[in-house]
Amino acid sequence: MSESTTPAVPFDPPVRHPIHLEVTDDLERNRLTVFFRLILVIPHVIWLTLWAIAAYLALLVAWVVGIVMGRVPDVLHDFLAAFLRYQTHVYAYASLAADPFPAFTGDAPYPIDLEIAPAASQNRLTILFRLLLAIPALIVLYVLQLVAEVVSLLSWFYALVTGNMNRGMRDLLAYWLRYQAQTGGYILLLTSRYPSFSDD
């Protein structure tokens, strides 16, 4: 009597999120720049604030065009993507998730960096109600932000003493940065995919 064998069901690997965080940080930290980090980040905060004003004006245009065409134009998508990348670099630097002083352009490589997929078609209805749809993700992001602030403070002391970043702390901050970037990308109409709790 032969046993019946069930054919194997093909397994499709999960599709990576269109906004993906790449971490190449080596965990080394300069004690001097760690000590003065909040002062050193001030020029970036000023530039990020100015860029944010332009980004939100561009978002308003992208929102109207997206509702009409079902797609954000490439030029607006690229501008908003560069803003999101730069914002991630600044937050990574300020929180000690990364150590090098970021470039001001948003397109230079960084130890905590974003890969953002090109513009794609989106559902017009989800574009129309994007801010309402993002509320649950924003609530989760608020909680992660509180955790990140505590971890960042603890990592400041740790890096000052050891000259290195604790891997667990860095990974927690990277998790927050990834979720923040995916939430920001969803709101900025860079993707129609909702923020993910996993890397995929």
Image (tube, rainbow, N blue to C red):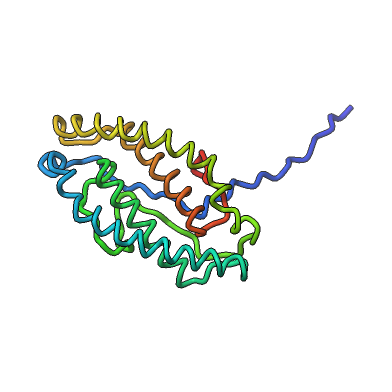
Q: How many marks?
A: 0
Residue 197 appears left or right of 104: right
Q: Is residue 83 left or right of residue 40?
A: right
State whether residue 35 is above or below residue 55: above
Q: Residue at x 29, y 57 (%)?
A: 48
Which residue lies at the image location 73% right of the left edge and 40% below the top edge? Answer: 8
Q: Position of residue 104 (x, y in %)?
A: 25, 61
Identify which residue is drawn at 30% across, 46% down: 92
Q: In the image as oriented, which residue stretches furthest toward the left? A: 32
Tell which of 11 and 103 is nearer to you: 103
Name the residue nearer the viewer: 171 or 59: 59
Relative to 72, does residue 96 appear above or below in the rendering? Answer: above
- Left or right: residue 90 compared with residue 136: left
In the rendered image, residue 79, in percent from the top left (x then y), is placed at: 40, 67
x 35%, y 59%: residue: 52
Residue 93 position within the rendered picture, expressed as x and y whole percent measured from the top left: 25, 47
* x and y percentages locating residue 69 in the rendered image: 62, 70
The residue nearer to you, when weighing 12 against 194, is: 194
